[in-house]
Image (spheres, rainbow, N blue to C red):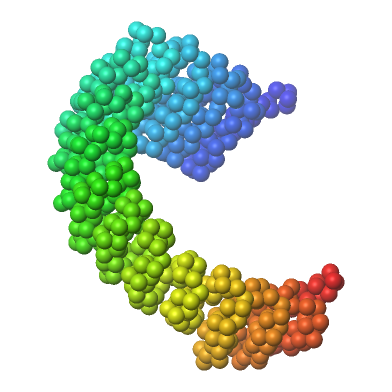
Amino acid sequence: MAMIDEPLYPIAVLIDELKNEDIQLRLNSIRRLSTIARALGEERTRKELIPFLSENNDDEDEVLLAMAEELGVFIPYIGGVEHAHVLLPPLETLCTVEETCVRDKAVESLCRIGAQMKESDIVDWFIPVVKRLAAGEWFTARVSSCGLFHIAYPSAPDQLKTELRTIYGQLCQDDMPMVRRAAASNLGKFAATVEQSYLKTEIMSIFDDLTQDDQDSVRLLAVEGCAALGKLLEPQDCVAHILPVIVNFSQDKSWRVRYMVANQLYELCEAVGPEPTRADLVPAYVRLLRDNEAEVRIAAAGKVTKFCRILSPQLAIQHILPCVKELSSDSSQHVRSALASVIMGMAPVLGKAATIEQLLPIFLSLLKDEFPDVRLNIISKLDQVNQVIGIDLLSQSLLPAIVELAEDRHWRVRLAIIEYIPLLASQLGVGFFDDKLGALCMQWLEDKVYSIRDAAANNLKRLAEEFGPEWAMQHIIPQVLEKINNPHYLYRMTILQAISLLAPVMGAEITCQKLLPVVINSAKDRVPNIKFNVAKVLQLLIPILGQSVVEKIVKPCLVELSEDPDVDVRYYANQALQACDQMMVSS
């Protein structure tokens, strides 16, 4: 008897938990659906579990969302693709609930299941679901149906295809803006499955209606449709149907629609081809760059380099550059920041002469911008300009500004400069670097912000790698070691960190002669933080130093630290001593 009752147990637990007042128990139960389905077997899952889920009228969105997600991957538990239609009823119900994220997940799961179903099953089971949802009394069902047409359409016979196109056209003219929005956002996917002959007629007339919708939220989704449809149409049809729409949209009364055009314009240019871009889209883009709404200018400014790549340098200089100059002194800091993040990429597009003459003054004005993000965006892309104009000119024109930024009051700007220094150093060469930037690198070791000091220590290591140990021995090591006597313990800690980073680059000899004595000496510091950092550094130096040095110098120092009154100093000293012992054992 026990054997017969056992399979009933999981479903009984599930039913109990699904009806439990505690939402967490209901959620756990839904998340374990696959386990329960395996216990029940495929047939009972189809006949008992799925119908039960269809009737389950839980009112918690979290539970419904989990259910919509689980059902999307349930085909293996109900006996494979030939039974996939069993999963459609519960998901159809979920497509009608009020919560958007539940509906979206249900649509996603239906699409996943539909994509695996046989053609005959799609006609018999899936298309009726789409039609029922599209005719739903409540708008939520009609919204959900829009996301299913691209799965249903390819498998339908001709008569049904005509019906589906008609239904989609009706959804695009629905009384509820939410339904029209869903139809507009899914139009690209649906159009990709429709035959070319209907694309130019029926789909384009649907599209025209959407582009003239009185709701801006529908029109802005139609902008996305422009790019999707543009890729499906022949170039000449694209110019005839899509181009006028884009030009109109770029002058739309709603700034959200114009913002969408600014964001999508590059993709739209690809769709219509180079000639119409030059004739019609350049003026539209210039209008967007000069838009009276800052959000639109931000979107347009962020695409300025991409857009210039499509154009010839002459066109870019003639039409786009004047706008870029205006934007570099825009009243909105976010516009300037968006411009600064991409403007460096214009240098390779425009070529050396135009960069020197036209872009350099803009770079300089943005480098001196009062808003730190603008300065940051310029600094991080300097290498793109260097490739075009060469280091001599870059150093003459931009270096004074960089030196000024190295002392910027915003620490993130200083940090960006430090991270750029090794690259700058490799491009400038040793001589130039010593004159101008060497002192700065030392100055950062005593910055008030820890992140700057940390980056400065790493920076010294990268410079030593770039210019070699001999250069570092002359220009870095003496200045670093001098600072170990700084009265403030935090600065002394930075020097210890710098030593630990420089030692592997400098090699055993210089480490033993110059760096190790300073570390050993710091073990007598009165601040415990310094002492346990000495132990950490010594542990890192052990592999670099020879066995005899470790035995004679490092170990006695660590033994002394391991008897320190401070618990942390003792802990790190013992860690380092263990490392010493391991080294002895392995050698």
Quadrant holding the N terminus:
top right
The percent position of residue 362, horizontal first and vertical second, equals 26, 62
Q: Please state the horizontal and vertical placement of residue 219, each as a whole percent of the image.
A: 22, 34
Q: Is residue 344 left or right of residue 288?
A: right
Q: Nearer the viewer, residue 219 or 238?
A: 238
- Residue 266 appearing in the image: yes
Rendered position, 329 above or below 42: below
**In the rendered view, does 162 fall on the left or right side of 51?**
left
Is residue 125 or residue 561 the one in the foreground? 561
Identify whether 203 is placed above or below 418. above
Residue at horizontal 46 percent and vertical 32 percent from the top? 68
Q: How far from the left and from the top, in percent, is residue 392?
A: 39, 68
Quadrant hosting residue 544 = bottom right
Q: Residue at x 49, y 34 (%)?
A: 69
Residue 22, percent across and down? Answer: 49, 43
Residue shown at the point (36%, 67%) measured from the top left:
393
In this picture, residue 233 sits left or right of residue 574: left
Residue closest to the eye, 225 or 345? 345
Residue 576 in sight in this render: no
**Which residue is at a point 56% across and 69% down the rendered structure image?**
466
Out of 94 and 179, give the one closest to the viewer: 179
Relative to 60, residue 42 above or below:
above
Position of residue 490 in the picture relative to residue 178 (left or right): right
| Quadrant placement of the C terminus | bottom right
Q: Give the total number of marks visible in the rendering.
A: 0
